[in-house]
Image (cartoon, rainbow, N blue to C red):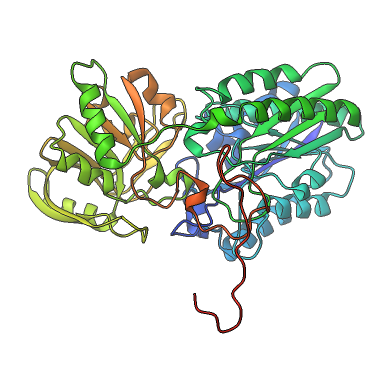
Amino acid sequence: MTRRVAVAGFLHETNTFAPSPATFSHFEEGGGHIPLSRGSEVLSHSKGVNIGVAGAVRFAEEAGWELVPLLWAVAIPSAHVEEDAFERILGELIERLKAAGPLDGLYIDLHGAMVCDHLVDGEGEILARLRAALGPDIPVAASLDLHGNVTGKMVDASDVMVAYRTYPHVDMAETGYRTAVQLDALMSRGKPIAKAFRQLPFLIPIPWQCTDIEPAKSLYADLAGLEAGEVFSASFLMGFPAADFADCCPSVLVYAEDEAAAAAAAHRFVSAVLEKEADFKGEAYEPDACVALAQSLSRGAEKPVVIADTQDNPGAGGDSNTAGILRALVGADAQKAAIGLIVDPQAAQKAHEAGEGADVTLTLGGKSGVAGDEPFTATFTVEKLSDGEFTATGPFFGASHMSLGPSACLKIGGVRVVLASRKVQLADQSMYRFVGIEPTEQAILVNKSSVHFRADFTPIAETILVCKSPGPMALLASDLPFENLREGIRMSPCGPAFRAPVPLAAGQAH
């Protein structure tokens, strides 16, 4: 029997402390992956791209499903999703689902850490409304980002959820495929499977969630081994530690033949994570110290020293426009150094007006509203101009088309700056090459990214350093003004526990 399955996607990772919200136009643009796609566009636009729906479609073709593509939308991580954007996109998705006719199942590509202006649990609301439209008996399977903050509402409204196992996320399409495998089994089974959902008691800083390094590397290897016998699927989500609501935390999901098997597997894995809690702590450097160390390490090195400007990562809600580490590079007279992306549409326009070879005085940074992000004014030489159109070449973006708007390579002393008009985290070597910078020939590379850049830059890096230059994605959750976390959760590995702020009495001064 040919199964008739709807496929869809609605993704956003929300940093509730970030400066800029996600508007409908941001979903139309697509945040570095594919633009808002409807109907057959979902299939054509996603083909060959490293996103969950592409992997689900690949399995569907192998299994002979009749696909009903509905809608797929993503926006680059930022502050809250605006109510208008959420309701317009979800409303259209529900309308398309209702018009789809009889279905045997639904696959949906989600992130797991969406917070909106008008509700904190974006994915819980998405899944609940989809469930209401489908009824109780049609299986719903969702793929999730490894950074998802999973809620009970999400678990209750879906039949199975499967998360990425790599950070950098080189397995997004593979996860979509694995999710479709579970959906196929559910449709054949004809009845629900048992679930175990556990939340962990500490937050993990983004840079130390990398699955290429310990302890995550070993934990994820062990996770795959849980899937045997009565256990059908196991996921470990390390969470996105910049969302101010009670379910912001790492979690474990296990699906199995019965509740006992699911609970036992979840308990074993949670215990393993807790044993390694202290190993999730890493080292980061202030800008001047980081640049000085990079200069020292680069002397005599055959490969560039790569620095992660983690606190201004646009993949975690930053606007990719702070200048703290640029100031440190220039102040240290760094040579053969490059930094990207610095996103400033007005500065990019001025560079284009000046033309290649011209000198232009620009002020970069100082626009984020983050303490310590001071404006940096200097005269740069415009080395190369670009329209910002190119194709990514590395494993994270997976041949995605990039559209960064008017862009330029600026030079000041021995430092080059990739200036762009639209933000995307620098996670691909092509994001230097499109303005004439060969990354392998640099002594120091500064990437506004936390971990995703490692997929394409680790092979060319002498070493990788993490910098705490000012930006809206604080390395440690304890540096953010949380108010609504779960009481008692540790703000960092083995760190202090969260205590809700005591409300001020009437008339008491702040």
**At which x and y percent is residue 216?**
57, 25
Q: Nearer the viewer, residue 71 or 130?
A: 130
Residue 212 drawn above or below residue 505: above
Residue 186 drawn above or below residue 244: above
Q: Quadrant of residue 132?
A: bottom right
* 154 displayed left or right of 451: right
Quarter occupied by the N terminus? top right
Residue 430 drawn above or below residue 387: above
Residue 424, can we see it? no
**At which x and y percent is residue 403?**
37, 44
**At which x and y percent is residue 383?**
13, 40
Residue at the (15%, 43%) spot, across then down: 331
* 131 displayed left or right of 377: right
Q: Nearer the viewer, residue 124 or 489?
A: 489
**At which x and y percent is residue 246?**
67, 54
Q: Nearer the viewer, residue 314 or 213?
A: 213
